[in-house]
Image (cartoon, rainbow, N blue to C red):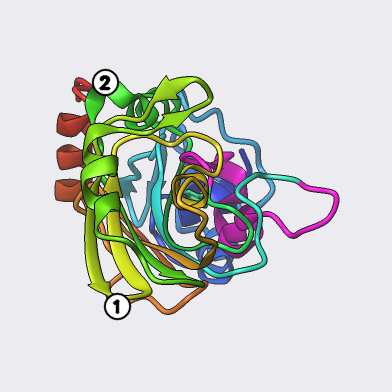
Amino acid sequence: MRLDKYLASAGKGTRRTVKEYIKKGQVTVNEQIVRDDSYQVDETNDIVTLFSEVVDYQKFYYILLNKPEGYVSATTDKIYPPVTDLVSEYDFANIVPVGRLDVDTTGVLLLTNDGQLNHRLLAPKFHVDKTYYIETDFPIDKKMITAFKEGIILDGEKTLPGDLEIIDEKKAYLTIHQGKFHQVKRMFQYFSLKVLTLDRVKFAFLTYEGLNRGEYRLLNKEEIRELKKLAKQEE
Ligand code: URA
């Protein structure tokens, strides 16, 4: 990885500021001053210092994005821009979205390059709750509360218990633990309702509070620890 990227990804400043540090001779690699910002660092073996202090290299990144409409949950696509375009400053880390939100779905979307955690967060056996805010074209029937609790048949299988909270006649929250293709839309379609608005307001304990659509932030240590605990992943 380029030296300037290495420093920026370790939180030592923007690409522009770290380039300055490099130019001024404030950075060493294996005890030698390096003034070339494109110098290729071996992340596992090289020892990099800035202002004479060793720089810790960060391997995994965990990003919480408030996904806007019009972006596809992928890293490339032929039609729509991918969500990774919104977090392009982390391109170097090869982050990918954790599961999928449809192009027209908004809200909490995690992105990470921690493949093991990504996989586990999606596994139904770990029961990570996902809560959606929904608006429909016609009134939501109260009988759907029981039906979703008991499970309905999608793809020839019963869905895991879901918790439907009706807000008013055409608005509700639904919490589910699975992520089948178009699951929420199809659960409502089962009752002949079209989902007009779908916003994921919560993924596990994470919300997009404080983030406008299209904005993102890194998870803090406590949040990462908590997610790993949920996914029963060792630190
Ligand atoms: N269920 C859906 O139908 N779409 C989503 O984007 C997420 C859950």
Residue nearest the observer in this picture, 67 or 56: 67
Q: Secondary structure at mark 1?
A: loop
Q: CA distance from mark 1 to mark 2?
A: 30 Å
How packed is label 1: few (under 14 Cα within 10 Å), some, or many (20 or more)?
few
**The C terminus appears in which quarter of the rendering?**
top left
Residue at x 52% of width, y 45% of height: 186
- Report if residue 168 lies within the magenta region: no
Residue on which the image places disc 1 = 210
Image x and y of residue 119, in percent = 41, 25
Q: Is residue 167 left or right of residue 121?
A: left
Residue nearest the observer in this picture, 164 or 16: 164
Residue at x 65% of width, y 36% of height: 40
Q: Most extreme residue toward the right, as rendered?
A: 78
204 is higher (above) or lower (below) than 230: below
Q: Which mark is residue 125?
A: 2
Image x and y of residue 105, in percent = 53, 61
How many numbered discs, if any? 2
- Report if residue 87 lies within the magenta region: yes
Badge nearest the viewer, 1 or 2: 2
Image x and y of residue 77, in percent = 78, 47
Mark 2: which amino acid? Answer: Lys
Tell me where the magenta segment starts and ends, as one range.
77-100
Residue nearest the observer in this picture, 192 or 187: 192
Q: Is residue 199 left or right of residue 40?
A: left
